[in-house]
Amino acid sequence: MPAYIIADVDVSDPKGFETYRQLVAPTITVAGGAYKVRGGTFEVLEGSYQPKRLIVLEFASMAAARAWYESDAYAPIKAIRQKTAATNVILVEGL
């Protein structure tokens, strides 16, 4: 069953975050993941939620998504993101 990592990213250091963007994509691909949304235009239809930069990644399963997120390959790259942006991240099982 597919699973999705959904992140709302508020970038505070655009130059540093660009380094993150360049490094993260290959780790996602190697882990079998794929971008479904990557900071595109959005429109709030209801409520007051105002995401800054929305990212949706798809993986084959919750286990595969968690394995990527907790991987040694992603750890140093995740640290760059955590220094350059405030991020809310959730993992959700798909249908």
Image (spheres, rainbow, N blue to C red):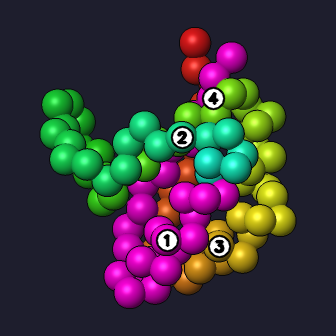
Q: Is disc 3 surrounded by few (<14), some (14 to 19) or many (20+) residues within 10 Å?
A: some
Q: In this figure, which residue is indicated by the disc labeled 1? A: 22
Q: Position of residue 73 (x, y in %)?
A: 77, 65
Q: 32 or 15, which lies in front?
A: 32
Q: Earlier in the sequence, mark 2 or mark 1?
A: 1
Residue span colored magenta: 1-27
- The alpha-carbon separation of the residues under discs 3 and 2 comes to 17 Å
Q: Earlier in the sequence, mark 3 or mark 2?
A: 2
69 sits left or right of 19 in the view: right
* Depth order, front residue of 45/38: 38
Q: Can residue 30 be seen in the rendering of this structure?
A: yes
Task: Name the amino acid type tagged 1.
Answer: Gln
Could you tell me which secondary element the residue under label 1 belongs to?
helix
- Relative to 48, residue 81 above or below: below
Q: Which residue is mark 3?
A: 77
Q: Which residue is mark 2?
A: 34
Q: CA distance from mark 2 to mark 1?
A: 15 Å
Look at mark 4 in the image and give the residue it sits on.
3
SS at badge 2: strand
